[in-house]
Amino acid sequence: MPNFFYEVHFYLFGLIAIASALAFVTRKSPVAAALWLVNTMASLAALYAMLEAHFISVIQVLVYAGAIMVVFLFVIMLLNLGHPSDLADARGRWGKLLAGLLGLALLAQVMALAGTRLPEPFTPGGDYDPNVVRELGAVGSVAQPLFNEYLLAFELTSVLLLVAIVGAVVIGRRRRIDAR
Amino acid sequence: MLAESLALSAVLFTIGAVGVLVRRNAIIIFMCVELMLNAVNLSFIALSKVYGMAGQVFVVFVMTVAAAEAAVGLAIIIAIFRHRQTVNLGNINLLKG
């Protein structure tokens, strides 16, 4: 089923994601780093669409590349951090070397884990059925388990968001000196 | 495409982890954490084709937690910046012995 056209674009977007992530980590300026991260997330959204998760792909663009990164850029602008800092941002040579070695070790471990034989699906083919996806649509096939089996977790998510909103407002509020 | 997706996810996660170790700017470290969350999301999506739609549901939850974490974390960074006039983690060493 995956034809040549599909594979070329899969590898293309994968390479774009890796290159953008590398550029993101190495940029000095926070604004440039944030924009490279947006590029990574956009190519990941393309990969999601190719892996037949269309709804997640749209949400990735809207929520991650749209909302979350705008908040990051807004804070960078608010604190006036757009210029590369004159202080050394990256750690010294030994720190970089150590981080590189740790990264290689981590990569080897995760690759070994990804290369092992995966366990058999609990039900043959899982409950991923192209016919069901075609019948319910891209949104309905995600909403079906979300509002049936995972309804409690979904409701708890609303509590988490409320706590996060209140916490962000309380922490970020500017206190008057004479208030205490 | 499952093996390729998992390998790409591993590479992206490692880049994010190395970024957390190397950089000292608190905002960039936060963005590295977001990159690691995205790498895990890619694993979820790739495995959801084999193991069922639960993977995509979990991606929705991960995104929610990421949004909450970004809001609270950036508020903390702003509060720290008001006190210390810096987001460089090398200068925020109140707990250093």
Image (cartoon, rainbow, N blue to C red):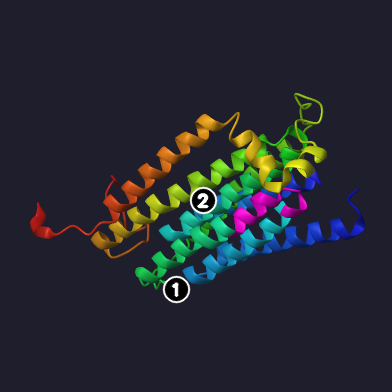
- Say few, some or many: other residues with alpha carbon within 10 Å of mark 1 (under 14 / 14 to 19 / 20 or more): some
In the rendered image, the residue lying farthest to the top is A122
Query: Where does the magenta region start and end?
Result: A49-61
Q: Quadrant of residue B80?
A: bottom left
What residue is shown with label 1? A84
Residue B13 vs residue A84: left or right? Answer: right
Residue B58 vs residue A169: left or right? Answer: right
Residue B52 in percent (x, y) is at 73, 34
**Mark number for residue B33?**
2
Residue B53 in percent (x, y) is at 70, 37
Residue A176 vs residue A85: left or right? Answer: left
Give the amino acid at mark 1: Pro
Residue B77 in percent (x, y) is at 35, 57
Secondary structure under the numbered disc 2 in the rendered image: helix
Secondary structure under the numbered disc 1 in the rendered image: loop
Give the amino acid at mark 2: Val
Callout 2–callout 1 Cβ contact below 8 Å = no
